[in-house]
Image (tube, rainbow, N blue to C red):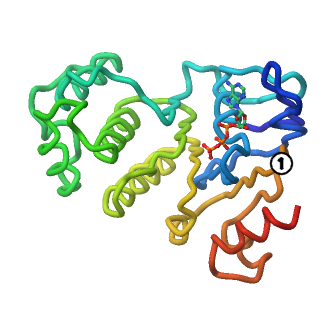
Amino acid sequence: MKAENIVFTYKKAKYPVLNGVNFELHPNKINVLVGPNGAGKTTLFDLMAGILRPQSGVAHFPSLEQILYITQSVFFSPEIKGKDFCKFIRRISSQPASSSCSDYIPIDRERERLLLQRLWDIKIGKMSVGERRWLFTTMLAEQADRELYLFDEPTSGVDPTSRNQIFRMIEGLIERNKTVVLSTHQLNDLKHLDCHIIFLHNGKIRYEGDYGAWLELYDTDDPDQAFDMITSSI
Ligand SMILES: Nc1ncnc2c1ncn2[C@@H]1O[C@H](COP(=O)(O)OP(=O)(O)OP(=O)(O)O)[C@@H](O)[C@H]1O
């Protein structure tokens, strides 16, 4: 799965957001899209999902039926409860919807089972931002069987324990040979993960490769410093 020389300009915009973007997704690592606010990460997700089409260049990604794309704002009625959401996701994945909370998270993931139990009878509108994001990301990714998973900032607003749970779930997808791309501004979270970094800035990919090699390139062990250096040098 790769992008070749993608150029994309929004209608009425003076300049292209993406101006000759090339990268190739790594099948066995967590692909992480990094870049400053407004760099075009969400735009690139929309292009990978086929929601937007490039003005030129070629996007080699599966068709939308083979993609699970969890955007920053998944909308569900605030009136439905955690359990209604879980059952709904089961039904649209053509699986029987169980009324038992414990059927939705494997038995060895005790903390996540407790969290789901807590959210089971709470309305989505009354959950915190982080609780809602954890529920949407975990349930959708666990139930849907796709080739490519796109997560736009899945851990934003989520506490460290739940962020870890989301990363464990993502590692599980990779073990099942799924391709995963996520975006994040929390670069320290990536330290202990096997990541393929795709760094987008000023319309182009400025770095693509291993997370450790990226830090070595900037002679630092602080990813925020490497981020600062890459964005100030161009
Ligand atoms: N629908 C749109 N029409 C016009 N311009 C847009 C549209 N959506 C985004 N943009 C512009 O395109 C640029 C890239 O936006 P995008 O949301 O892809 O960035 P991002 O890297 O995801 O940012 P962030 O890290 O803040 O989420 C921004 O300058 C934004 O203002």
| Marker count (numbered) | 1
Pick the residue in front: 102 or 184. Answer: 184
Percent across and percent down for residue 200 are: 76, 50
At 80% from the left and 36% from the top, the residue drawn is: 17
- Left of 50 or right of it: where is 17? right
Where's ligand 1: which quadrant? top right
Residue type pointed to by label 1: Asn
Image height of 186 relative to 200, above or below: below
- Left of 215 or right of it: where is 180? left
At 58% from the left and 53% from the top, the residue drawn is: 30
Quick one: SS at disc 1? loop
Pick the residue in front: 111 or 157. Answer: 157
Percent across and percent down for residue 54 are: 81, 24
Image height of 201 relative to 121, above or below: below
Percent across and percent down for residue 153 are: 52, 46
Percent across and percent down for residue 77 are: 29, 20
At 40% from the left and 29% from the top, the residue drawn is: 144
User: Badge 1: few (under 14), some or many (20 or more) residues near its Cα, within 10 Å?
Assistant: some
- Left of 97 or right of it: where is 172? right
At 37% from the left and 53% from the top, the residue drawn is: 158
Q: Quadrant of the C terminus?
A: bottom right
Q: Quadrant of the N terminus?
A: top right
Determine if the C-beta at disc 1 is less than 8 A from ligand 1.
no
Name the residue carrying label 1: 202
Image height of 119 relative to 69, above or below: below
* Quarter location, residue 123: top left
